[in-house]
Image (cartoon, grey):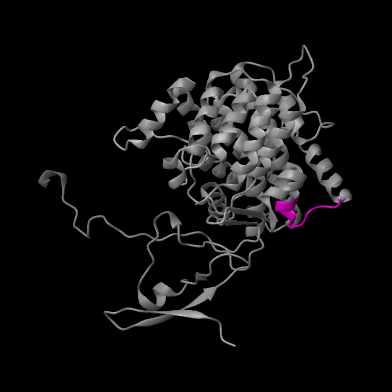
């Protein structure tokens, strides 16, 4: 039985080419255009790669129309309710949920690699005191390859696996150190008798003079956010990790590149933009006028944290985190004018026909920004929190890439719009 294909014909030359149809387990099929240029002389033009599948992947599936997000086939709703971030990290990397013994071994191994080299303190000390923590995280992660140059044989599966473990283990330590450096606090070593998220919170907020007492809802909320942000298919930062990885670059360089991509305000910086918007609105009594401005295309004011490029009806992650957001606000009894603005804005967005008709629902960035604010995590650390979570997805994709049979170095083409060929003119004649 022959493979299905689609035949394209150039009307000008009557030249035809059969493009094989490639199908996955779920989702729309794709046309294999690998031989298109060779056989027809044409490339495809797809700005932003919105209609182009760059790889085969078994990690994450999204159906934006139906609001479906699956990690390795498991609905995000089930994982958010029953799993933990570290178990989800294991799932993304290995393809299956661990049994008890496998998870204990994985948890122990991650804990064993949480320490960062003491020389990294000197590296962080080289930054200006008010440097953005994403700059410190990006540079520090890239520098890790200098400490593990003896285990960078990318043809060795065990060395690849070890690098993935190290990244998941060390990025929270580096992130907490970057935060503390910025506020002038001494670095805290990881307490490996604590679980992953609680250990990170202790490194962030504990001071030598007194033990840190955490409300259980804080760790639970952060663990949930990490689960929801762990992976999201071929987004900009994950595609960046894969593109850099396709060159054979070491994993620390690849993840550092992913961090740099995540830093963009259109990607990981979206929840930071939400807080800036709330600050601009200023008071709950200003919400009605802000909404009116947002409806006016000529006002230049835009509401951040509403709608989603992929999810056309609702963001399943936002549905999950909304409940936790209100629980955090209630349990911590937080009093903050900006959070009052957020609650008022959410109420309008869920009832106003303008928002409903355009499907401008509050998305995961809207709620995550509110939770981070309630947990007293500074705004400049929001994208760092995202990076900690997304590291699990990045390393899973990086590992998968190395066992994909038809993987090639990434090399997008272009439509050239510059000057045609011309001759050099000496400066005296210009």
Q: Position of residue 388 (x, y in %)?
A: 65, 38
Q: Quadrant of residue 23?
A: bottom right
Q: Quadrant of the C terminus?
A: top left
Quarter in which the N terminus is drawn:
bottom right
**Percent from the top left, x then y, of residue 326?**
64, 31
Residue 355 vertical placement versus 133 (above, below): below
Q: Which of the pair 271/314 is nearer the observer?
A: 314
In this rendering, position of residue 250 left or right of residue 52: right
Q: Is residue 308 left or right of residue 44?
A: right
Residue at coordinates 59% horizontally, 42% vertically from top-left?
318
Is residue 21 shown left or right of residue 25? left
Q: Which residues are magenta?
A: 91-99
Could you say where residue 281 lies in the image, as x and y percent from the top left?
44, 24
Identify the residue at horizontal 53%, vertical 66% (top origin). 28
**Is 380 drawn above or below residue 59 in the view shown?**
above
- Residue for point 48% across, 26% down: 278
Q: Residue at x 85, y 50 (%)?
A: 102
Q: Residue furthest bottom?
A: 1
- Say whether residue 340 is magenta: no
Q: Is residue 143 visible?
A: no
Q: Is residue 329 visible?
A: yes
Residue 119's quadrant in the figure?
Answer: top right
Residue 34: x, y in percent?
47, 71
């Amino acid at each position: 039985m022959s493979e299905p294909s689609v035949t394209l014909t150039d009307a000008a030359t009557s030249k035809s080419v059969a493009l094989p149809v490639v199908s996955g387990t779920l989702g729309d099929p794709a046309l294999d255009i690998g031989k298109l240029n060779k056989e027809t002389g044409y490339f495809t033009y797809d700005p932003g790669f919105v209609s182009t599948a760059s790889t085969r992947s078994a990690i994450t599936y999204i159906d934006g129309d139906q609001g479906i997000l699956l990690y390795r086939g498991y609905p995000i709703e089930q994982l958010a309710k029953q799993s933990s971030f570290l178990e989800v990290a294991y799932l993304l990397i290995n393809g299956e949920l661990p049994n008890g013994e496998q998870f204990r071994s994985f948890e122990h191994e991650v804990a064993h690699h949480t320490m960062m080299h003491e020389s990294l303190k000197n590296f962080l000390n080289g930054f200006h005191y008010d440097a953005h923590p994403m700059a410190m995280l990006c540079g520090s992660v890239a520098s890790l390859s200098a400490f593990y140059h003896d285990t960078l044989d990318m043809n060795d599966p065990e060395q690849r696996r070890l690098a993935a473990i190290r990244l998941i283990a060390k990025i929270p330590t580096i992130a907490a150190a970057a935060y503390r450096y910025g506020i002038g606090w001494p670095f805290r070593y990881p307490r490996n008798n604590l679980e992953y998220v609680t250990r990170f919170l202790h490194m962030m907020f504990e001071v030598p003079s007194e033990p840190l007492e955490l409300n259980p809802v804080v760790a639970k909320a952060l663990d949930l956010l990490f689960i929801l942000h762990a992976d999201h298919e071929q987004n900009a930062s994950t595609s960046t990790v894969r593109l850099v990885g396709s060159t054979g670059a070491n994993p620390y360089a690849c993840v550092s590149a992913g961090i740099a991509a995540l830093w963009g305000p259109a990607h990981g910086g979206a929840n930071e933009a939400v807080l800036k918007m709330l600050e601009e609105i200023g008071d709950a009594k200003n919400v009605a006028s802000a909404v009116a401005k947002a409806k006016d295309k000529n006002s230049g004011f835009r509401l951040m944290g509403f709608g989603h490029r992929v999810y056309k009806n609702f963001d399943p992650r936002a549905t999950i985190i909304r409940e936790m957001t209100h629980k955090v606000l209630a349990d911590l009894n937080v009093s903050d004018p900006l959070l009052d603005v957020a609650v008022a804005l959410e109420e309008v967005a869920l009832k106003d026909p303008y928002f409903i008709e355009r499907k401008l629902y509050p998305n995961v960035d809207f709620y995550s920004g509110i939770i981070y604010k309630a947990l007293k995590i500074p705004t400049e650390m929001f994208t760092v929190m995202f990076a900690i979570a997304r590291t699990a997805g990045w390393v899973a994709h990086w590992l998968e890439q190395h066992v994909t049979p038809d993987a090639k170095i990434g090399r997008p083409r272009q439509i050239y719009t510059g000057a045609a060929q011309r001759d050099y003119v000496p400066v005296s004649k210009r």
